[in-house]
Amino acid sequence: MKLSIVLPVRNGLSHTRQCIAALRDCSLPSCEFIVVDNESTDGTAEWLSGQQDIEVVQGQTNWSLAQSFNAGRKKATGELLLFLHNDVICNRLALLALMKVMEMDRVAATGPLTNRWQLVQTVRTTGAIQFCG
């Protein structure tokens, strides 16, 4: 199944580059990157314009996180959708685990459990929310 990864950003070029580099290292066969750039002023827009494998959505400074995720979701073409922050570093095992949980019957959402709440986060495991009823 194809995985669409939506990443909203506003500045934080260093984090964005690290996040995308880690995702690229995962070498998933069917994956797309969608970055919603909310008027970054730190060189993010220029860096993104040179990335052939990233779909860029131009956001606005005042877009909320939800608005950014929704704008990216509208561009997504994958059957699976991962909303990710640019300060999260995922490895291949973590992404495959998230995808496996997303493919389970009656799972509504999944997300990573991380080792930090500040600075760069490293995904260690996953959790799942199941539909009730």
Image: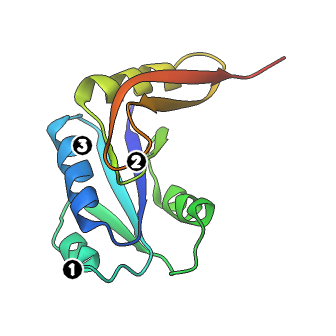
3 or 1: tag closer to the N-terminus = 3
Amino acid, disc 1: Glu
The answer to whether mark 3 and mark 1 are in CB contact below 8 A is: no
Q: Secondary structure at mark 1?
A: helix
* Residue 24 lies in quadrant: top left
- Closer to the observer: label 1 or label 2? 2
Cα distance, mark 3 to mark 1? 20 Å
In the displayed structure, 80 sits above or below 84; it is above
x then y, percent, for residue 46: 21, 79
Residue at the spot of label 1: 46
x then y, percent, for residue 122: 31, 35
Amino acid, disc 2: Gln
The answer to whether mark 1 and mark 2 are in CB contact below 8 A is: no
Rendered image: mark on residue 118: 2
1 or 2: tag closer to the N-terminus = 1
Label 1 Cα crowd, 10 Å radius (few <14 / some 14-19 / many 20+): few
x then y, percent, for residue 50: 15, 72
x then y, percent, for residue 74: 54, 60
Cα distance, mark 2 to mark 3? 20 Å
Residue at the spot of label 3: 23
Pick the front one: 25 or 88: 88
* Residue 44 lies in quadrant: bottom left
Q: Which residue is rendered at x = 54% and y = 17% of the image?
A: 104
Pick the front one: 27 or 79: 27
The answer to whether mark 2 and mark 3 are in CB contact below 8 A is: no
Label 2 Cα crowd, 10 Å radius (few <14 / some 14-19 / many 20+): few
